Amino acid sequence: MTYSVSQLLTKDITLQPLEIKGWVRTFRANRFIALNDGSTINNIQCVVDFENTDEALLKRITTGAAVHIKGNLVESQGKGQKVEIQVTSIEILGDSDPDEYPIQPKKHTFEFLRENAHLRTRTNTFSAVMRLRSSLSFAVHKYFNENGFYNMHTPIVTGSDAEGAGEMFSVSALDPKNPPLTKDGNIDYKEDFFGKETNLTVSGQLEAETYAMSLGKVYTFGPTFRAENSNTSRHLAEFWMIEPEVAFMDLAGNMDLAEDFMKSVLSYVLKYNREDLEFLEQRLLDEEKTKPQVERSELSLIDKIKFVVDNNFKRVTYTEAIDILKNSKPNKKKKFNYIIEEWGADLQSEHERFLVEKHFKCPVILFDYPANIKAFYMRLNEDGKTVRAMDILFPGIGEMVGGSQREERLDVLIEKMKVLNIDEKELWWYLDLRKYGTAVHSGFGLGFERLVMFATGMGNIKDVIPYPRTPQNAEF
Ligand code: 4AD
Ligand code: MG
C-alpha cells in the first residue's frame, strides 16, 4: 500500500510493510532521510540501514532526488518526530546532482527563489503558501455554492474596457510589421481576427451583471489583466479576481456580503490549514525580528486572521475619511507624499494604510466616493456628486475589494457615458439590461492574490501566485 506523508503522520496505519514516494529534503549521517511529498508541511523521517545498503546507492540519496521507499512505520527512537519509517528498500526514481541543484537545504532569499519559481514549491514556505492558496480557492467556491450563487465563466477576450482606465493588453492576430490600414492611416481592426479591436479583460463584471439580471446571484473567479506599469509589491499584470454580482441587492447588502464572504473563507483556512499557518506565522516572526520595533506588527499571523474573522469591519464614508485624513498628523506635518487638501482628492495607498493601520486598526469599508474618481457604472447618489462605491481596505495590504451598487437608470447611465466618451454602440448589450426589467443590483471584485497575501503574511504579491507576470517579466 502506498501512502502520502500526511496519511502516515495522521492516520493509524495497520497495513505493513508500506510504500511511499517523495523527494529527499535532507540526508543526514548516511542514515536519516527527511522525505517530503507535498501533502503536508511536515517531512517523514526514513531511517536507512546503511550498513546493509550498497555504497553507490547511498551516494545517490541527495537533496532533491525522487525516491521510492518500502519499509515499516515504527515509533521513532529519536526526538523530533513520533513515528519514522524503517527502510527495507529504496529505489532512486530520479537523481538530483547535489552540486547543481539550486534548492540547497539552507535559507534562500525570496528574490533567488523567484528566479527559480519552478522549484520554489520544494521549500517549506512556498509549499505552505501554495497549499493555502489552493484551500482559499476551494473555500471561495464552497461559500458561493452554499449561498445560492451560480458560477459563471466570463470571457477573457473582450471588446470592452470595464474600468475605463485604458490599461489593457490588446489581442490581435494582425501582422504587427504590416497591419492593414484604414483610409485615414489607422490600423483597420475590421480585418483582424474578431473583426474589431479586442483586449484581455480587466474585469468580468459587465458580463456578470448580465447573468445576475437573469440568474439572480452569480460570481466569476478568473484571470484578469492590467497593463499598468506599476512595479509594486501589490500589483500584478495578471491576477485572479473574485466577482460576485447580485440582483435586487443594494450597497448595504453588498457590504454585508463582502464581509461575510471574507470572514467565511478566512475561517476555512484557520480550520483546515493550521500547520501551514503555524509555519508561516513562525516565518513572519523570524522576519520581523530583523525589523525595527515600530515596524513590527502587534498581532501574530493567526491572531491577525482571527481578529478579522471575529470583529466587524468599520464602515466609513469617503467624506468622513477625508476629514480624518485632513486632521491627521502626517497630513499636517506634510509626511504624506500627497497632502490631502480638499474633498474630491483620490486616496493614495499611504492614506488608505493610515486609515486602517493607524486610525481604525481594523478592516475598513469606505463608501460613497466622489463620482469623478470612480468608474462609469456606479450608481449616482441623490446628492449628484457621490456614487454608491465601496472599497474594503485591509491592514498591511491596502485595497482588497472594490465594488459598488450599479447605475440601473438608463437615462443617468447614458448621460454618464456621454460625459466620459464611452461609446454607447460598444455597450449596447449592457444598456439593454437597463431597458428590459432593470433593477437595483450590486457586486464587488476581490483581488485573490491580495487575500492570499493577507492569509499567508507574505509581503510581496509575486510570492503568492505560481508564476507572476509583472513589467519586464513573463518567465516560465
Ligand atoms: O477595484 P477594481 O479595479 O474593481 C473592479 O475591477 C470592479 N469591476 C470589480 C467589481 O465590482 N466587480 O479591482 C478589484 C480588486 C482590487 O480591489 C484589488 O484587490 C484587485 O482587484 N486588483 C489587483 N490585484 C493585483 N494586481 C493588480 N494590478 C490589481 N488591480 C486590482
Ligand atoms: Mg479599485
Image: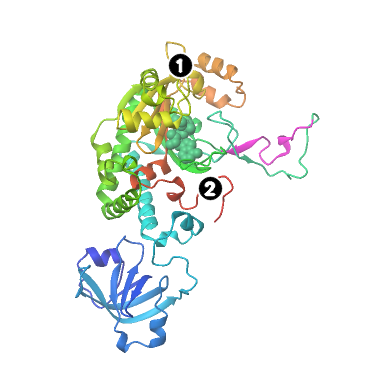
Say whether residue 198 is magenta: yes
Q: Residue at x 48, y 26 (%)?
A: 338
Quarter that holds the N terminus: bottom left
Q: Earlier in the sequence, mark 1 or mark 2?
A: 1
The verdict on label 2 being within 8 Å of ligand 1 is no
Query: Image quarter for residue 246?
Result: top left
- Residue 161's mark? none
> In the image as oriented, which residue stretches furthest toward the top?
383
- Residue 342's mark? 1
Give the magenta part as a residue range. 185-200
Q: In the rendered view, would you say 374 is above or below 200?
A: above
* Colouring mode (rainbow / by chain / secondary structure / one colour): rainbow
The amino acid sitting under disc 1 is Glu
Choose between 106 and 292: the one closer to the eye: 292
The amino acid sitting under disc 2 is Arg
Q: Where does residue 441 sit, x and y in percent of width and height?
A: 41, 24
Residue for badge 2? 469
| Residue 39 placement, left or right of 83 | right
Q: Residue at x 29, y 30 (%)?
A: 313
What main secondary structure does the magenta stretch of the protein show? loop
